[in-house]
Amino acid sequence: MTLPLITPHEVRRDLIARREIALLDLREEDPFAKAHPLFASQLPLSRLEIEILDRVPRKATKIVLYDDAEGLVAPAAERLAELGYTNVHALHGGLAGWRAAGYELFQDVNSYSKAFGELVEARRHTPSLPAQEVKARIDAKADQVILDARRFEEYATMSIPGGISTPGAELVLRARELAPDPSTTIIVKCAGRTRSLIGAQSLVNAGLPNPVFALRNGTIGWTLAQQTLEHGQSRKFPSVGEQTLEEARARARDVAYRAGVRRLDSQDLKDLERDVDRTLYRFDVRTPDEYVTGHIPGFRSAPGGQLVQETDVFAPVRGGRIVLADDLGPRADMTASWLAQLGWEVYVLDGGFSQALERGTWTPSLPALPEVETISPRDLAQAIADEAVVMIDLAPSPAHRKGHVPGAWFAIRAQLDVAVTQVPPNKTIVLTSPDGALATFAAPELEALTERPVQVLAGGTEAWIAAGRALETGLTRAANAPTDNYKRPYEGTDNAAEAMQAYLDWEFGLVDQLARDGTHGFYVI
């Protein structure tokens, strides 16, 4: 199919004018993290059908696709056309065209949220303490609480001594419960800088009477100072009393008002939902556990701190609308205050939790799955024992490392043409993925690449586990290099000091990059 071209200048013009546009990078995460435009969202060809319906929910949205001459645009455009998307373009010249136009390229992931965090610190001079001083205060048993603003899973992996898991959106709601004495110092930390800065500034913006600081450079700064981390901790924030809740509501509502956040009720929301010319995202910013207990139908789980940190992942359509829900209030108000400063048209839903609620985890919207030949976990186990099949696992490489069907080869769906030449020949190929959906989409593509029989593990690796079958760990059989995953220098416990310092140096330069780029439209209250 012939795809209309759009120039980098036209994309930039749409961004500045805040017209709806989704600039999608079709490459895997590692090459994406090396260079991309500020507002590009990484949505790899490998996972297109799995993610597109939720990330770009309006079929008439202006979508701009690009790669770096890997040949990903044409197949992506064909799949989008099959799914009913009607306004798809190709970036003229791809990534090289953007570079040739003289426009700024950014590194890492969640770049514009991180750049915004640096802008906040530069404009508001967010108070911070170096790791050595925080360590000295811990040793001296100073009157302080240390609040870890990351997801609980990150906190449990590694944390600084005494830290309490209090994800970003919970800070204004919970901080006074944890530090009721106004003289108690509050220190907010994350892995690097962004969530520390945004978290600490949230408390400052909300007018908490306590001394508030960010841990300068987060866990990276702590590690570079050669100080000891804790692992496997489970300290979590407490519930809040009525007085604390009312105080937090008033403080958060005031911050949201100053940021220009708008409010609506359920009827107003229905009016927005009827507007077919605008993209509408609906996010529940409470904790995942609360979401599972009961949530408003149609709202996706997006804990507020992560939504601000990963806005490009949750909402790739720049210029769309966002509605936030929170049964208590402060988490939505504080999250909305940051999204508004990031340039979003954002609303907070008043009420909505008195209606019938849905239970359970959020599940992605999927297109109809193709008809494929499947094999049960029991039959697969016998086929493996008979050495009659070769397994290809399309799970993300971190998930493959944690556990996969024994003998399975890791592969990337968009690179199956290479993968099929790397695995043992003359055997039936069985594809799997975590729940089987990605493997099902990939099976017809693999059939077109080989004359060998192709099957899909029914229910995916999750069904294999549910059947009580053992897993194998590690990445010892790779049919493709694991470029689907960018090794973050601020996650995990085995990061090189040079990589961590380089990451900090990159963050320090983001404010200047924003100025050169000129498309962001951020403001800081």
Image: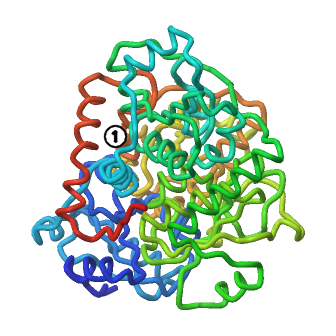
Residue lying at 34% horizontally and 73% vertically, measured from the top left:
65
Tag 1, which secondary structure? Answer: loop
Residue occupying image coordinates x 52% and y 43%: 393
Q: Is residue 286 above or below residue 275?
A: above
Q: Residue at x 39, y 43 (%)?
A: 126
Nearer to me, 162 or 86: 162
Say whether residue 514 is left or right of residue 295: left
Callout 1 amino acid: Ala
Expressed as whole percent of the image width and height from the top left, the position of residue 313 reads: 48, 59
Please provide percent x and percent y for residue 382: 70, 34
Q: How is the image coloured?
A: rainbow
Q: Residues within 10 Å of mark 1 (few under 14, many from 20)?
A: few
Q: In this rendering, would 110 be left or right of 292?
A: left
Can residue 57 be seen from the camera position used here? yes
Q: Quadrant of residue 470?
A: top right
**Which one is in front, 214 or 209?**
209
Quarter of the rendering occupied by the C terminus:
bottom left
Is 294 situated left or right of 517 in this image? right
Residue 428 visible in the shown view: no
Q: Which of 348 and 113 is in front in this view?
A: 348
Left or right of 13? Residue 103 is left
Q: Looking at the image, is 310 positioned above or below residue 253?
A: above
Tell me which residue sits at (88%, 68%) in the image: 354
- Residue 246 % position (x, y): 76, 53
Please state, as top left, top right, bottom left or bottom right, where the N terminus lies in the image: bottom left
User: Which residue matches tag 1?
Assistant: 481
- In this view, the residue farthest toward the top is 139
The tally of labels here is 1
Q: x%, y% of residue 462?
A: 69, 42
Q: Does residue 243 lie above or below 180 as drawn?
A: below
